[in-house]
Amino acid sequence: MITLPPDYRPSDDEEFMNPLQVEYFRQKLVRWRTELLKEAGGTLASLSEGGIHEADVTDRASVETDRALELRTRDRARKLVGKINQALQRIENGTYGYCEETGDPIGLKRLEARPIATLSIEAQERHERMEKVHRDD
């Protein structure tokens, strides 16, 4: 088990995905997953409080809109938790931080911003260009 110094931040001066960096991102992913699950628990509690009791049509529509938004948010959180779990699996098998297309390092800045990234910026941009080309068909 690796203990991270409290002020540790990954830097380009050290070996990419050394044990400290791997542990740093593992903890970041676990914290993010915990937050999402806690929020989802709150959403579930508010959704299960029963039916819509507002008599006014406008109030009822507002409550229904809020619920639809909550369900969409919950679905997005569920998908994110799945991607976080996949990232944690990549940490376990030693492939985390490397582009699944090229095998190149994804880069610390990108992983800081999007710890579930599976593609380098270059590969991501290629994918987006390909999607755009196929979308225009």
Image (cartoon, helix red, strand yellow):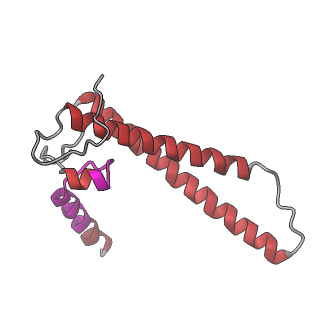
Residue 3 visible in the shown view:
yes
- The single residue placed furthest to the right in the displayed view is 55
Where is residue 69, by image quadrant?
A: bottom right
Q: Residue at x 87, y 62 (%)?
A: 53
Q: Residue at x 58, y 49 (%)?
A: 39
Looking at the rendered image, the quarter that the C terminus falls into is bottom left
Would you say residue 120 sits in the magenta stretch?
A: yes
Residue 129 at x, y = what percent? 22, 68
Left or right position of 122 against 1 = left
The N terminus lies in which quarter of the figure?
A: top left
Q: Is residue 111 above or below residue 66?
A: above
**What secondary structure is the stretch in magenta mostly built from?**
helix
Residue 136, image x, y percentages: 30, 75
- Residue 95 visible (yes or no): no
- Tell me the residue at 26%/29% (across/down): 93
Residue 88, compared with residue 1, is above or below; it is below
Q: How many numbered tags mark residues here? A: 0
Q: Which residue is located at x 59 percent, y 47 percent?
A: 40
Q: Nearer the viewer, residue 124 or 134?
A: 124
Q: Which residues are magenta?
A: 112-130
Q: Is residue 131 left or right of 17 when viewed as pictured?
A: right
- In the rendered image, residue 72 lying in the magenta stretch gets the answer no
The spot of residue 108 in percent (x, y) is 20, 50
Which residue is at the front of the view, 123 or 40? 40
The image quadrant that residue 4 belongs to is top left
Return the residue found at the far top. 1
Q: Nearer the viewer, residue 12 or 54?
A: 12
